[in-house]
Amino acid sequence: MTTHVRTASASHAGNNDKKNIFQLFTRLQDHLELMAAIVSGLLILTAWIGDPYLNNQAFVIFHILAFVIGGYAKAKEGIVSTIQDRELNVEMLMIIAAVGAGLIGYWTEGAILIFIFSISGALETYTMNKSQREISTLMNLQPEEALLLISGSEKLVPVDRLQIGDHILVKAGERVPSDGRILKGTTSLDESTITGESVPVMKTTEDEVFAGTVNINGSITVVVTKPASETLFQKIITLVQTAQSEKPPSQLFIERFEGTYVKIVLFSVALMMFLPHYMFGWSWTDTIYRAMILLVVASPCALVASIMPATLSAISAGARSGVLFKGGIHLEKLSQIKVIAFDKTGTLTYGKPEVTDLHFRSDEEASQTLSALYSIERESNHPLARAITQFCSNNPNAKRMDLHQMTDIAGNGVTAIIDGHTWKVGRPGFIDQRAAENFQEGILHHLAQQGKTVVCIEDERGIAGLIALKDTVRKEAKAAIRSLKAQGIHTVMLTGDNETTAKAIAEEAGIDEFAAECLPEHKLEEVKLLRQKYQNVAMVGDGINDAPALATANVGIAMGEGTDVALETADVVLMKNDLPKIAKAIGLSGKMNRIIKQNIVFSILVIGALIVTNFLQALDLPLGVIGHEGSTILVILNGLRLLKI
C-alpha cells in the first residue's frame, strides 16, 4: 500500500510538471503578438535613428523586417479569413495600405501603420485571454485523477474513465473528482467553487458532493452519480465557454456590415487614385498618396473593435462575481428588461420550511405536548415533519417517547398511541377545524394571514397545541427587490401556494404583484402576458417547473443551486444564489451598452473627420495612421474598463 501511494504521488507530481510547462508555453504564445509588435517598433526606431548612417537598401530592409515581424499575425489572420469567408476584411485593407505606402516610398509611414495595427491586435488578444482566464482557473480546479476502489484496493484512474456507480476515495485536502453521494465518512467541504460561500459545509452519509470542491478534514467514500462530462462543475465551464464564443447581435451586424464596407472603401480608393488628378489637377504622386491615406483612415478597425472587447470584458467581470452569461446577446438584452418575474420557493425563499410559532394549551403541558409531537414527527419523511423534527431536536424540553400503532393518513396527518393515549397531528381540518379556529382566541386565523402553515396537535382532551411553519424569505431577497425598484423595474412573484401565503410572502419581500396557485403551464402563461404588457421580461427560477417560463422570457435567470433543467434552460446563472447580483448584472449590461455606443459614435466621427481632412489635403500619412490606429486602441481600452467592475 505504501508503495502504491508513493507511485500515485509521483504520477500526480509528474502531471503537475506537465501542466506547468503547458501553462508557461501558453503564456508565451499569449504574449507572442505583443513581443512581435515591440520588435517591429524597435526596428522602425533603429531605422529612424540610423537614417543618416544607413544606405537606402539597409533603410528599406529594416522597414521590410518591421513589416514582416509586426504584420505576420494580422496578415495570416486576414488571408485565412478571406479564403474561408471569400470576403475581404479590415486586416487585408491594412496590409494593402501598408504595402501601398511602401511602394510609393513611404516606408516609415507604412511600417508605423503595421506597428500600431499590431499593437491594437495584441490588445484584442489580451482581452480574449483575459476573458478566458476564468475558464483556465476553473479547469485547473478540476482534478484529473481519482482513487477508484476495486475489491478493497485503490487504483489511480483518469477522471474521465469514472462511471456511474463507481466507488471513489477522497482524502483530506483533496478535491472531489466527480459529482456523487457519500457512502461512508463525515467531513467538511469547501464548496466556494460552486456556491461562492466561503464557510465549509458539513457532509455525512447520503449527502451530495460536487466535483471541484475541497475535502477539508476527513476521508470519505463516494459513489459516482454523474459522468465527468455532466458534473455541475463541467456545466459551469461549458456555460462560460459558450458565453465567450456567442456574439451579440450588434457584433454580428458589424461583421456583416464589414464585408460591404470594405468593398466600398476599395472602390472609393480606386476612384481616388484617378479622379482628383483629372478633376482637380492633383499630381499623380499626390493622388496616389491621398488614395493610400484614404485606404488607411477609412478602414473600420475602430468600429469593428467597438463591441467584442467590451462584451468579453463584461462577461469576464460577471463570471468573476458569480454571474454567468451564456452569451453576449443575453448580456446585451438585460438592460432592456422592464419587469422581472420570480419563482417563490427556492428563489425568493430558501425552499425549506422552518418553525416560527408554538402555542400550547397551557405552559404546564408544553413539555409533554412537544415531546409527543417530536416522537410522532420523527417517524415521518414529510418536509413539514422534517422541519418540526429538526426544531424539536434542538429543544431541551422535547423528549423521545415510545409510540405504538402509528397510522399515516396521506395529505392530512397521522395518529399514534403514546403511553396508552391517542394523539393526532395534522392540518386543522383533519383534527377539528372549528376547535382549531377557536383555539386561543382565533390565533389560527392570525397565523394563516401571515402566510404560515399551521399543524395542530390533539390529545384525548382536544387541541393541545398549534405549531406554525413558514418557508422563510431569503435574507438578501428584500435588498435585491429594493435595488431593482430603484432601477425602475417592476417585480412579480409566481407561486403554486395559496393566495393568503403568496400575499404574505410578496408583502414581506416587497414584490409589486403576485400570481398564486400557479402550475408550470400557468407560470408560462403569466410570462407570456407580461411580455405582451411590458415587452422585455426576465424570469428567475430554480426548479424543473420553472423551465418553460425561463425559456419563454426574454432573459431566463437560474439559481446556481437549481435543477439541471433550469440551469440548461436559463440564459444567465447566479452561481452564488445571490439575488442582489441581478441588479448589478443589469447595471453591468447598461454600462456595457453605453460603452459600445460611445465606441461606435467615436469611431464613426474619427473616420469621418480623417476622410474630410485627407480630401482637403490637410492630413499626412503619419497623422492618418496615428488617428486611425489610435482610435482603435482607445475603443479597446474603453472596453477593457469593464474588467474593473
Image (cartoon, rainbow, N blue to C red):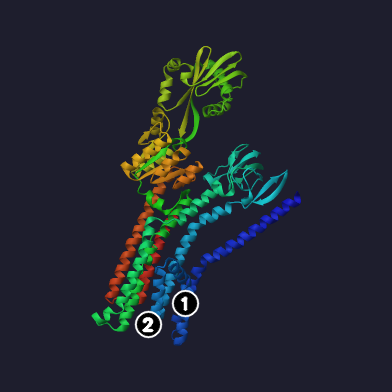
Residue 122 visible in the displayed image? yes
Seen at 61% across and 60% down, the residue is 20
Q: Residue at x 46, y 20 (%)?
A: 428
Most distant residue in the left direction = 279
Count of numbered marks: 2
- Where residue 581 appears, as percent x and y from the top left, is 43, 45
Image coords of residue 457 (percent x, y): 51, 19
On residue 66, which mark appears? 1
Q: Is residue 543 visible?
A: no
CA–CA distance in space, label 2 to label 1:
17 Å
Question: Residue 203 appears at what percent x and percent y?
Answer: 60, 39
Task: Check disc 1 and give the amino acid type.
Answer: Ala
Image location of residue 108, percent across then percent down? 41, 79
Considering the numbered disc 1 on the image, is that residue within a helix, a strand or a loop? helix
* Left or right of 192 in this view: 111: left
Does residue 23 appear to the left or right of 341 in the view shown?
Answer: right
Q: Which residue is mark 2?
A: 104
Q: Image height check: is 623 above or below 453?
A: below
| Circle 2 SS class | loop
